[in-house]
Image (cartoon, rainbow, N blue to C red):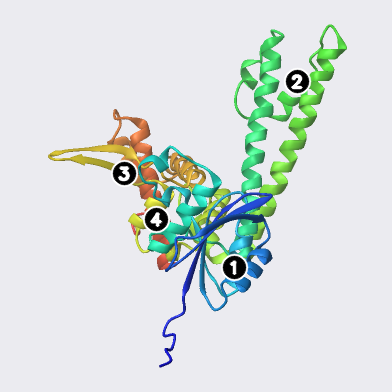
Amino acid sequence: MKTKQTARPKLYIGIDIHKRSWKIHCSTDLFSGKSFTMPSQPEILKNYVLKHFPNYEVSTAYEAGCCGYYAHRCFMNYGWRSLVVNPADIHRKGKEKYTKTDKIDAQLISRELKDGRLDSIEVPDIKREQLRSLFRRRNDLVKDFRRVKSYIKMQLLYFGIHIPEEFDNDHWSHKFRNWVDAIVFKYPTARESLDSRMRYFRFIDQELRDVSTKLRAYCRKHYKKDYYLLRSIPGIGGIVACGIISELGDLRRFNSIKHLAGYVGLAPGVHQSGDNQRSTGITMRAHRLVRSYFIEASWQAIRTDPVMQAYYRKHLGKNVKTVIIKIARKLLSRTLAVIKTETPYAIGVIE
């Protein structure tokens, strides 16, 4: 009597991805698996599967990291199920927490995938992914900009040159820049050192302005509706709106403010044991870049929105950091509301 195959056998592939090589662990419903190393090319893995596991239903998973989503898109094009997972979501038992190798990582990913305990992170489309790269480039330029300003101030302090009170602030006006250029040193080497730093400062300054302009122009053109909905909220300027669009994607995919706050990292942590329950502050798991932008925008919202200002004054005397986190959560709630309702924000209407 001949038997018919009623279901396709399943193959689970855990991948520990690196620049030059991948550590692979393959397992099926019938055996625990095999580990091996291969070059970092999706086509080689495809040929291996076609040769050794023909007619299998393939599922793959790997940790999100520096290698991006290229491999994921290739696997999806092959007709495989592919997950890109947060490394924190991979459960480790006992001693597995203290032993880490590429082989073990691949085995753990394969095991969790086989047991159905993995969920993929949100994978952006190529258009939004490349917009995100421009936004993050701007963020890198901001760090460089602050760093070179600190270096220049450090050099002035080192040589005992005091900055006039009218210039001693974060805004470097053209008068201040001309004052720095006019400083006379006893020997030309110090002047050359400061000139080099000022040239670098002016380059970073101009590059930051150009990237910011292009970023805002792109979002106004390609994400016009969401961009202007976000700009209607007091405290959210052009750059913050671009950051929300590029980093969070379409906010309509979030079911509730609780879901969005947990993703951004503006949700409270709780620890309970018996009758004892305490708050552990905001969760450590967060999209730290977006969270920092929302907290920064909250300070601006206090200055421009009477509702936020009243809320802040109501809590005067308490821990300022705790209050501003609560305001950031309210600002996040407004953000989700205006996108979901597609209605520009009006004070006292959407809360």
Image location (x, y in percent) of residue 27: 48, 63
Q: Which residue is mark 4?
A: 260
Residues at discs 1 and 4 in contact (Cβ within 8 Å): no
* Foreground tag (1 vs 3): 1
Q: Which residue is mark 3?
A: 268
> Furthest residue to the left?
275
Real-space CA distance between mark 2 and mark 1, rounded to the nearest whole angstrom: 56 Å
Q: Quadrant of residue 204?
A: top right
In this rendering, would 275 be left or right of 287? left
The circle on residue 75 is 1
Instruction: Name the element at disc 4.
Output: helix
Image location (x, y in percent) of residue 185: 81, 10
The circle on residue 180 is 2
Image location (x, y in percent) of residue 293: 50, 44
Q: Amino acid at mark 2?
A: Val
* Foreground tag (1 vs 4): 1
> Quick one: 187 or 348, which is closer to the camera?
187
Real-space CA distance between mark 4 and mark 2, rounded to the nearest whole angstrom: 46 Å
Q: Residues within 10 Å of mark 2 (few under 14, many from 20)?
A: some
In this rendering, would 31 be left or right of 223? left
Q: Amino acid at mark 4?
A: Leu
Q: Earlier in the sequence, mark 1 or mark 4?
A: 1
The circle on residue 272 is none
Say above or below: 122 vs 297.
Answer: below
Q: Amino acid at mark 3?
A: Pro
Q: Amino acid at mark 1?
A: Phe
